[in-house]
Image (cartoon, grey):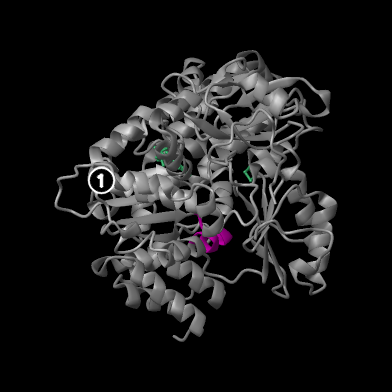
């Protein structure tokens, strides 16, 4: 069962098998190009594999958009240490729900992408770190892994090539911070999910301090299509320097929320109107968070942009994790900023002070504001406090909390002012907030 | 400490996943699956996990405090989690949470006296496009209305299993 009706504007590459009966099974996968890309990759050198990924223009789908081929090339392949492949399936950026579908409907596509990554750097072991809340996906993944072993796709002789590759799932236990790559690796080693100082990056010292490729689920899922059809084909699907398609998660005030696979560079207004069916109830658009809660909000008149990393960055936000959160004219932006900050304050791991204290203070200030007890000077204070967190934290969680807050106060200062002098929230009826 | 044969088998599988000198990697998976059977992270469970993974009990204890899904006290048989994060909030997540509190008479992280139902306001659970979303234990419910939530809670309170409650459907497989 698919959660939303596909849209004719979609370009289905990663999601093309989602609607097939028994799409989880290896039989369905093998009957629909499954493991053919791996077969090709097994006949290529490590350099050729990495060059193909570079040519595809694939950039990491976890948030930062780092070029994947380049990342793979940083792994010191000559190192005597074992190499590891780690899949980030911690998906917990508010607004994001695509990795869930990729695992639920096509787990073998992920396995194939991971094994190819293993061939690129000579890794013989991979792990899939899945957030604890996705328990049923751990079962889906384990079944698929068992099938792949039974067919000789995984194991000591990958598809008769004489090479080894082993893969296992790993359960998290509830922590947004464990989506951050270095915290994920700490957590994977059975510790608290506090981040590590970087550099060294995981490519050099990752899993068990060994060279590691760590990517998002969707990034690995794009790899088979690249080898099946060529890097140039994949690059051609998207916009310059932004190869391929991406699964956009439309949520909030749209008529047809859902996960849609669209080419990189697809126009945001078209996404809302033609894919998402427009704003609910015929209301006007007020704002959009283009890539999950860490990304600065865009005002309605800033939304006529191409959804690729560079265009959204040019609009001073980020493409992030693909979570497109649509807000209509009746949304209270103070409330939205507060709810997002409550999240970051809750999820800050407490390891470094600017993040731990900054998020808590911002939560308090925003709560006071939303309750009508804010002072004019607080508007400046919220902005200043946020700016003082930027770049001063161990990991980017501090930035992830500060950046959207700065955008909320700068772009919607009028709404913050409307909450001054004990005035009740002007949007109280349409958008309430629970007590902290 | 004794566990069911199923859990023992699972633990064995977990411990085999990691290199011989890296058994500590199994700590978190063992804790969360162990908790599902034991009901909470007890001192005995901590000691057992420590023994089997080569970690110290203190190392295991400090892990427990970090992760939101690990809890030292038992929760209800049905742990009802309502997401109020941004995507859910925009389409009624806060109202749903209020309704859950009103209906059960419970607050955040509280458990009913009979131990049947506990409540938690949670962060994004990866169901943003099908919001507002609720999880009961590990099962997802999407696009939940306050009426459906009422029916769900009524059903659970009447001793029904979630799958026997016709008005709501689980979406996870
Ligand atoms: C606080 C925080 C949370 C993150 N959460 C996730 C996550 O849930 N999933 C994910 O893939 N990446 C997440 N990231 C990004 C990862 O650190 C990392 O950049 C990414 O997994 C790399 O894969 P990619 O290059 O394929 O995007 C997070 C980063 C931060 C700072
Ligand atoms: S915001 Fe509620 S599930 Fe993502």
User: Can residue A318 be seen?
Assistant: no
Residue A140 within the segment the image draws in magenta:
yes
Along the line of sight, the residue nearer the viewer: B104 or A206:
A206
Give the answer, above or below, for where B63 lies relative to B12: above
Quadrant of picture, ligand 2 = top right
For disc 1, the marked residue is A121
Q: Is mark 1 within 8 Å of ligand 1?
A: no
Residue B87 within the segment the image draws in magenta:
no
Along the line of sight, the residue nearer the viewer: A18 or A349:
A18
How many C-alpha atoms fall within 10 Å of the one at disc 1: few (<14), some, or many (≥20)?
many
* Residue interval drawn in magenta: A131-141
Give the answer, above or below, for where B86 lies relative to A420: below
- Tell me the residue at 81%/49% (across/down): B145
Residue A307 coordinates in the image, percent (x, y):
55, 23
Give the answer, above or below, for where A256 lies relative to A387: below
Residue B17 coordinates in the image, percent (x, y):
35, 67
- Tell me the residue at 24%/37% (across/down): A47
Please indicate whether residue B54 sits to the left or right of residue A247 in the image: left
Residue A189 coordinates in the image, percent (x, y):
33, 59
Along the line of sight, the residue nearer the viewer: A335 or B6:
B6
Decide whether the magenta segment is chiefly helix, strand or loop.
helix
């Amino acid at each position: 069962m698919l959660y939303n009706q596909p849209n004719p504007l979609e370009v289905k590459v990663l999601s093309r098998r989602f609607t097939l009966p028994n799409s989880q099974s290896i039989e369905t996968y093998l009957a629909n190009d499954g493991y053919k890309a791996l077969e090709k990759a097994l006949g290529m050198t490590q350099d050729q594999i990495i060059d193909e990924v570079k040519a595809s223009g694939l950039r990491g789908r976890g948030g930062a958009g780092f070029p994947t081929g380049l990342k793979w090339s940083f792994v010191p392949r000559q190192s005597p240490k074992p190499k590891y492949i780690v899949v980030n399936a911690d998906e917990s950026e508010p607004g994001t729900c695509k990795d869930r579908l990729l695992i639920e409907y096509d787990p073998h596509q992920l396995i194939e992408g991971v094994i190819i990554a293993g061939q690129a750097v000579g890794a013989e072991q991979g792990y899939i770190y899945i957030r604890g809340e996705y328990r049923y996906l751990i079962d889906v993944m384990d079944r698929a892994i068992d099938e792949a072993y039974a067919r000789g796709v995984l194991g000591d002789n990958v598809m008769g090539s004489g090479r080894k590759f082993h893969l296992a799932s790993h359960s998290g236990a509830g922590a947004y911070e464990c989506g951050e790559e270095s915290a994920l690796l700490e957590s994977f080693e059975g510790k608290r999910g506090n981040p590590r100082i970087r550099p060294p990056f995981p490519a050099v010292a990752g899993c068990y301090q060994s060279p590691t490729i760590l990517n998002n689920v969707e990034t690995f899922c794009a790899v088979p299509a690249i080898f099946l059809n060529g890097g140039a084909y994949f690059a051609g699907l998207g916009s310059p320097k932004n190869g391929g398609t991406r699964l956009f998660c439309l949520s909030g005030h749209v008529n047809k929320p859902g996960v849609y696979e669209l080419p990189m560079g697809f126009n945001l207004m078209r996404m809302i109107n033609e894919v998402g069916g427009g704003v609910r109830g015929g209301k006007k658009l007020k704002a959009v968070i283009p890539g999950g809660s860490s990304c600065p909000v865009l005002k309605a008149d800033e939304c006529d942009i191409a959804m690729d990393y560079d265009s959204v960055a040019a609009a001073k936000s980020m493409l992030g994790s693909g979570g497109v959160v649509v807000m209509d004219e009746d949304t209270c932006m103070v409330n939205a900023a507060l709810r997002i900050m409550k999240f970051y304050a809750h999820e800050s791991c407490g390891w470094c002070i600017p993040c731990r204290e900054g998020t808590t203070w911002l939560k308090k200030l925003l709560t006071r504001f939303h309750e009508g007890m804010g002072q004019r000077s607080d508007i400046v204070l919220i902005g200043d406090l946020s700016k003082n967190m930027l770049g001063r934290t161990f990991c980017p969680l501090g930035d992830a909390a500060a950046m959207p807050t700065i955008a909320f106060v700068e772009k919607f200062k009028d709404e913050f002012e409307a909450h001054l002098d004990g005035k009740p929230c002007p949007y109280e009826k349409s958008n309430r907030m629970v007590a902290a | 400490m004794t566990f069911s044969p199923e859990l023992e088998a699972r633990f064995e599988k977990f411990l085999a996943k990691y290199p011989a000198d890296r058994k500590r990697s199994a700590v978190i998976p063992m804790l969360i699956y162990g908790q599902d059977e034991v009901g909470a992270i007890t001192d005995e469970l901590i000691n057992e996990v420590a023994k089997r993974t080569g970690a110290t009990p203190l190392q295991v204890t400090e892990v427990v405090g970090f992760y939101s899904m690990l809890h030292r006290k038992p929760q209800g048989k049905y742990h009802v989690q309502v997401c109020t994060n941004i995507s859910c909030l925009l389409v009624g997540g806060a109202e749903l949470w209020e309704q859950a509190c009103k209906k059960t008479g419970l607050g955040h992280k509280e458990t009913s006296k009979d131990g049947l139902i506990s409540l938690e306001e949670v962060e994004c659970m990866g169901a943003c496009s099908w919001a507002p979303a609720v999880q009961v234990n590990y099962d997802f419910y999407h696009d939940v209305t306050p009426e459906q939530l009422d029916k769900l809670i009524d059903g659970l309170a009447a001793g029904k299993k979630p799958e026997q409650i016709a008005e709501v459907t689980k979406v996870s497989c």
